[in-house]
Amino acid sequence: MAKTVTLKDDESGKSWKFPVLGGTTGPDVVDIRKFYAETDMFTYDPGYTSTGSCESKITFIDGDKGVLLHRGYPIEDLAEKCNFEEVAFLMLTGELPDAKAKKQFQHDITYHTMLHEQLHSFYSGFRRDAHPMAVMCGVVGALSAFYHDSLDINNPDHRKISSYRLIAKMPTIAAWAYKYSLGQPFIYPRNDLGYAENFLYMMFATPCEEYKVNPILAKAMDRILILHADHEQNASTSTVRLAGSSGANPFACIAAGIASLWGPAHGGANEAVLNMLKEIGDKKRIPEFVKRAKDKNDNFRLMGFGHRVYKNYDPRARIMAKTCSEVLSELKIKNNALLDIAVELERIALEDDYFIEKKLYPNVDFYSGIIFQAMGIPVTMFTALFALARTTGWIAQWREMIEDPQQKIGRPRQLYTGQTKRKFVPLAKR
Ligand code: CMC
């Protein structure tokens, strides 16, 4: 028998039955699509803590157990055994590519990495000290003014080409945002380099001399991109879906996702973690900051700690911590003061009753900044890197939404607590 739940209005004694839908794994959901029509009430869930907004086959998280699966594959396997392009292919198509498909996909992405030459002048409209995320929002949004031939969202070929363009051009856009901030010439992508390698090349090469990307750092960057590739219906992904639900073009939707990611509670946390570690400055000061994080009257939080879904160690943070030691050892960095503070801060927080009770563990952003900094990436670029990696997930989720026959424009309701109808007061009488 199909599962249902019954809601009873205690005042009137009326009751309603709602169907319960089961996924392949994870909690069941109550189907409330007819809730308003049947009950004349809305549901109320600010922050969507208990609300499923869509059906998806891309990513599954078990926050209690600290499990993250993409298309069924554990993140640990993907991070260890795949490169970023394979994971992007998996996100988009549902399956890992075979050798031939992998080669073709890498070729397709590689041959879309250049930006329209006129975008050069678009960059010069920004101040040199603009935050790279501001530049990313602007440039990605502007892509819809340059690639008119792939904007028909109802055409599967257009959807595919714009997906490839977004994934392919994002490293170029991010690296150019950095080059622009330095006043250095833009470095064009190279077709003989892999995805992560090409990004590092465009970030650090100059036209004056040969630049060879360190393969260990390229591998580490590739893994970091995989770790950030998707994370089901987080704020930025939901923003992309909501923007796209009106039929907006994918470039505009991804620009909206970048804007949402920028906030410190989301992708901006990696930048905030590093700034926090610098502010702590000395292991001796950790207890003072932990005390502040617990103080209800202080809005300071331990950045890189806590997660809406994970109530256990974020599996990405574990891989990130390992990658961090690999990178530091490759770069022969023996004493990294910020890493020492981070490790000690993690130890103290994980033994503290407040963090234990609230199940607050390090998240993906806790160690990533230390790696980026060791690689020579400036703090303001951290969130731009997150955006570059997450574009794959955003675009896969956007495509899944457009292809979903149940898709409707997203339109939440509200609990109105403002003035009810009142008489207009003319200016002279106010
Ligand atoms: N430091 C101190 N206390 C915290 C922290 C923290 N980092 N995170 C949550 N809490 C407390 C919070 O004060 C609340 O306490 P109480 O129940 O007494 O009011 C309780 O834990 C639950 O927090 P919440 O804000 O209701 O939880 P949420 O699910 O709405 O927020 C979060 C999740 C990630 C926004 C939050 O944990 C946070 O602000 N963390 C720091 C920022 C951060 O690292 N963000 C990156 C998230 S992972 C990558 C990404 O999504 O981009």
Image (spheres, grey):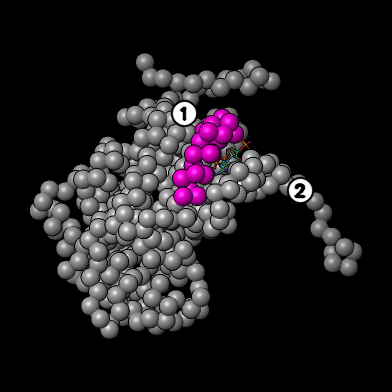
- Seen at 32% across and 59% down, the residue is 332
Provide the residue span drawn in magenta. Answer: 340-359
On screen, residue 288 above or below 219:
above
Image quarter hosting the N terminus: top left
- Dot 1 lies on which element? strand
Q: Amino acid at mark 1?
A: Val
Q: Which residue is mark 2?
A: 419
Q: Is residue 165 left or right of residue 247?
A: left
Q: Is residue 12 left or right of residue 192?
A: right
Q: Is mark 2 within 8 Å of ligand 1?
A: no
Using the image, tell me which numbered label, if any, was put on residue 101: none
- Earlier residue among tags 1 and 2: 1
Q: Which residue is mark 1?
A: 30
- Seen at 53% across and 54% down, the residue is 277
Magenta stretch, overall SS: helix
Q: Nearer the viewer, residue 350 or 125?
A: 350
Which corner quadrant of the image does residue 105 belong to? bottom left
- Seen at 66% across and 19% down, the residue is 10
Q: Is residue 303 left or right of residue 388?
A: right
Q: Quadrant of ligand 1?
A: top right
Which corner quadrant of the image does residue 395 belong to? bottom left
Q: Nearer the viewer, residue 278 or 196?
A: 278
Mark 2 is surrounded, within 10 Å at the Cα level, by few (under 14), some (14 to 19) or many (20 or more) other residues, namely few
On screen, residue 256 above or below 209:
above
Q: Is residue 272 visible?
A: no
On screen, residue 13 above or below 376:
above
In the rendered image, residue 221, in percent from the top left (x then y), is placed at 31, 57
